Amino acid sequence: MTFLNFFISGISLGSIYAIIALGYTMVYGIAKMLNFAHGDVIMVGAYVCFYMVVRYELPPFLGVIIAMAVCTMLGIIVERLAYKPLRQAPSLAVLITAIGMSYFLQNTALLLWSSNPKVFPSIIGRGSFKLFDGELSVSHITALTIGVCLVIMAALTLFVGKTKMGKAMRACSEDKGAAQLMGINVNATISLTFAIGSGLAAVAGALLCSAYPTLMPTTGALPGIKAFTAAVFGGIGSIPGAFLGGLMLGVIEIFAKAYISSQLSDAVVFGVLIVVLLVKPAGLLGKMTQEKV
């Protein structure tokens, strides 16, 4: 049962990566830009949830809702102030701005909350389910993480595929100019995309810190990079690709820690990514596109 325990742990970690990767892939799919400040939005969401639960003694569920609201507003503000003025700018300028916004959020967090590590309380408790006469143990947070990821994936797929705003997102992804000629408000659609991605980042932050309780201003940096890797792994711009890439990345990381080395696990993860991109440059579920010049 040891193998199965590792596999479930990998699915749980991968579910967190998948939720974060959805934010990356939605923004890239519609705005064609990489929001490297996304990992720091995760950190902000985790801190807001922490203070709501610990200082103000609110129920964990309510703390997550408030964190989602704060991160949603933060995502809209960041998009309006930092990215909207650069809509027609070269991609390098947008990339540098995204990195600058990431450092700005990290240093603001240092000023507000200091660099001292904080122990994040579990939003569902530290208990576990025992299966097969106790040989298989699944923690409550693991079950919750996997369940939340599946619900978010299903809801997002239905939203993008069935709703009017979801169709507007797909239209903007295909051709912003044509979408605007058809009466779609491109700026509002991109802002909504940032809002959804940032709200999901708050959920991911709460789940991440419940599983790995140490909370610091740099908490979202490494998970953010790995989630971006998961998005590229699955095919950036593809929602199912972000889901698949996140799960596979989590499983690979846990098995690398268990059977190779905990110190080399990150190298194994990025090595697998390089091999996949050499074989399939667009990612597992991505599509190669040709640009007219």
Image: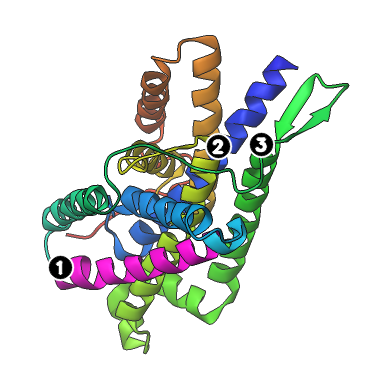
Query: Number of numbered discs present?
Result: 3
Identify the mark nearer the N-term, 2 or 1: 1
Q: Which residue is mark 2?
A: 211
Give the magenta range: 64-86
Above-or-below relation of 20 to 160: above
Tell me the CA gap for discs 3 and 2: 9 Å
Q: What colour-coding does the image apply?
A: rainbow
Q: Which numbered circle lies on residue 86?
A: 1
Tell me the CA gap for discs 2 and 1: 37 Å
Identify the mark nearer the N-term, 3 or 1: 1
**Marks 3 and 2: which is nearer the front?**
3
Dot 3: element? loop
Task: Give amino acid for label 1.
Answer: Leu
Task: Give amino acid for label 3.
Answer: Arg
User: In the image, residue 169 lies at what x, y percent?
Assistant: 43, 72
Q: Which numbered circle lies on residue 126?
A: 3
Is 80 magenta? The answer is yes
Residue 89 vs residue 39: left or right? left
